[in-house]
Amino acid sequence: MTRLRARLRLEQASVTTGQTMSQLSVLGRIGDSGPVTASELAQAEHVRAQSIAETVTTLKKQGLVEARPDPADGRKSLLSVTSAGRQLIDSIVDVRGAWLARAIEQHVTPDEREILAQATEILSRVADSRSEPPTGESWRV
């Protein structure tokens, strides 16, 4: 997974305009989630609120994210992607997707593709889980 992630980063490098991986991750999360609060982002990204605030500030300065008052709670702001942010996300997705599709087509058999699709679904669920640390001996690797 680490090597694949590094390769996808390398492929996207031709598209980005100097954003860090954490900035791109937050931008993508905002794009996927729609309007979202900074605290929701911090939870989803598994980082502190202060880290999200710094990242969001940078993305706002770059014109990739905008904040609007939350109609349900005036003390909060809802973050959303601007059209420039959406264009960047789409271009990264296109580049990554094209590379990954070529790699799978060239190096993965049809039977392995089905296994890969199942594994992708499982890993997505694991990555999105909010599991608490195991207690006692109820779970072991």
Image (cartoon, helix red, strand yellow):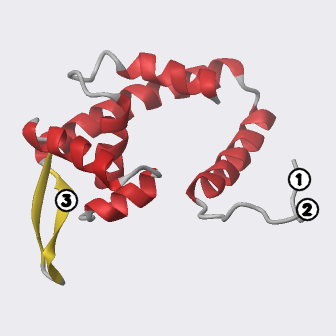
Camera-side residue: 80 or 108? 80
Vertical arrangement, residue 67 with respect to residue 109, above or below: below
Q: Secondary structure at mark 1?
A: loop
Vertical arrangement, residue 104 with respect to residue 40, above or below: above
The type of residue carrying mark 3 is Leu
On the picture, is 126 further left or further right than 43? right
Q: Residue 140 got which mark?
A: 1
Q: Secondary structure at mark 3?
A: strand
Q: Secondary structure at mark 2?
A: loop
Are circles 2 and 1 on residues that touch, CB within 8 Å?
A: yes
**Residue under pointer 3:** 79
> Residue at the location (45% across, 31% down)?
97
Are circles 2 and 3 on residues that touch, CB within 8 Å?
A: no
* First of labels 2, 3 by sequence position: 3
**Residue under pointer 2:** 137
On the picture, is 136 further left or further right than 105? right
The type of residue carrying mark 1 is Arg
Camera-side residue: 45 or 89? 45
On the picture, is 67 further left or further right than 89? left
